[in-house]
Image (cartoon, grey):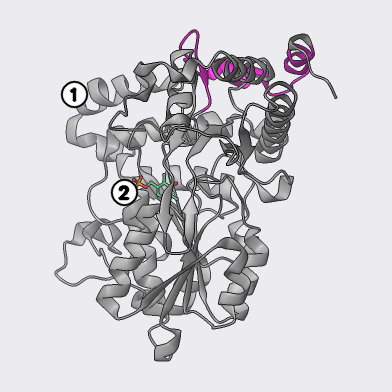
Amino acid sequence: MTHTLSSCQALDWHDPLRHLRDQFDLPAGVIYLDGNSLGVLPKTTPARIAQVVQQEWGQDLIRSWNSADWFRMPQRIGDKIGQLVGAGPGETVATDSTSINLFKVMSLALTLQAQVPLERRVVLSERSNFPTDLYTAEALCRERGWTLQLVEAENLPSALKTQPGVVMLTHVNYRTGAMHDMATMTTAAHEAGAVMVWDLAHSAGAVPLNLNQANADFAVGCGYKYLNGGPGAPAFVWMNPRHAASLGPNLWQPLAGWWGHQAPFQFTPDYRPAPGIQRFLCGTQPIVSLAALECGVDSVLAAQPLGGMAALRAKSLALTDLFMDLVEQRCRGLGLKWVTPSTHAQRGSQLCLTLAADMPWPPHAAYAMVQALIARGVIGDFRAGNQHSGGLYPDILRFGFTPLYLRFEDVWNAVEHLRVVLTDREWERPEFAQQLAVT
Ligand SMILES: *Cc1c(COP(=O)(O)O)cnc(C)c1O
């Protein structure tokens, strides 16, 4: 089908989710294709932060732990996130960072599998998983005498045959946009006798999830990506309730602290973990940041009356299908190649391109293209390729599509900018070759 600017505008007109965009303060002249890295600012957030700071802290002071329900914010926001990831009430808490939560659940996963024979003391993951996940797993493996085994996604089924003790995967790959089938993979991991840990950083708020139906063991996810919680927002952690049910007070996470105690205000010298997920809280939580996260999560929950995650997913697929079609139509022969699978079930809400190998690109070309797009107000990002033992990961031009606030018209305009950057060789300008500290 041939798209035009006006056919894209018609899609916006008929989009049942189009008013959700009004929840956000989007800068003029920007097409934001980076909500997978830092979500946008909800209009409610600044006033809520001012209220927490000026009223709850400034006036009500320490009384706010009770009067403003500060103390229960990790659970309250966790339950809201739970609605987006297929978790029941009381199964999720918002706390700490993704990296720290991953440390907690991975440490526990290894402990749960402490009895496996030596040759099964293996954490299986993907080589192209996000680095912090691999570093966390590697550090724990060093400490416990386990081995981290890294394979490409297509080799996971054969690697499972060797029965690793723990499987740790990111549901949507940050580098390729490829998505695992959570239920199938979890079942395969369990059949191999493994504990299954999911990182939902690029999934929560982007694709429908059902942790309970998949019968996963543990999950962590990010607050500042599709959940719009703001830079460095607290992350979340989920544990299958069957673990707490079977182990009860014997189930300790490694960062035991008073917020995860059964009765924190009895100040007893001995640790007794709180029931359920609350034991994953360590110490005093960042209330101002949690307040911002709650505004972000509420902005996603605003889609619930309109069909929730299923409706958001349908729009996300329509947006990404359109981007793929338009790149095929308008950027054909300009040297771009897809990294993300085109099959709906195999991709999340981001699309990644790389440079065709049969053209003579200078080393900084992909970076410069992203910079040239940013100069035109089209914000995506660049992920550097690297050499590894099994071969080469290419440089990536990465575009995230957040259905809460992106319009079909934005997709049309983004591809038009991309076409001009390539055909006019705008990316070759020297100013776009300067590498910044954060890409
Ligand atoms: C974004 C992301 C993180 C971020 O971790 P932080 O602790 O917030 O820095 C971790 N893992 C994955 C897979 C991510 O995509």
In this rendering, the answer to whether 406 lies above or below 171 is above
Please tell me which residue lies in front, 44 or 362.
362
Which corner quadrant holds the N terminus? top right
Q: Badge 1 is on which residue?
A: 58
Q: Earlier in the sequence, mark 1 or mark 2?
A: 1
Start and end of the magenta stretch? 7-33
- Amino acid type assigned to the residue bearing label 1 in the image: Gly
**Badge nearest the viewer, 1 or 2:** 2
In the image, taking residue 11 as reference, residue 218 lies left or right, namely: left
Where in the figure is residue 266, as x and y percent of width and height? 19, 61
Q: Which mark is residue 66?
A: none
Q: Which residue is mark 2?
A: 96
Q: What is the residue that sits farthest to the right in this orientation?
A: 1
Q: Position of residue 394 (x, y in %)?
A: 49, 45
Name which residue lies at 45% across and 19% down. Answer: 428
Residue drawn at 35 percent across, 75 percent down: 249
Q: CA distance from mark 1 to mark 2?
A: 24 Å
Q: Relative to 29, is 116 above or below? A: below
Beta carbon at label 2 within 8 Å of ligand 1: no
**Residue in view at x 24 percent, y 24 percent:** 53
Residue 43 visible at all: no
Q: Ligand 1 closer than 8 Å to the CB at disc 1?
A: no
Q: Is residue 267 left or right of residue 196?
A: left
Number of other residues with Cα within 10 Å of mark 2, as a class: few under 14, some 14 to 19, many 20 or more: many
Q: Secondary structure at mark 1?
A: loop
**Between residues 223 and 330, which one lies in front from this camera angle?**
330
* Residue 328 placement (x, y as % from top left): 73, 29
Amino acid of disc 2:
Asp
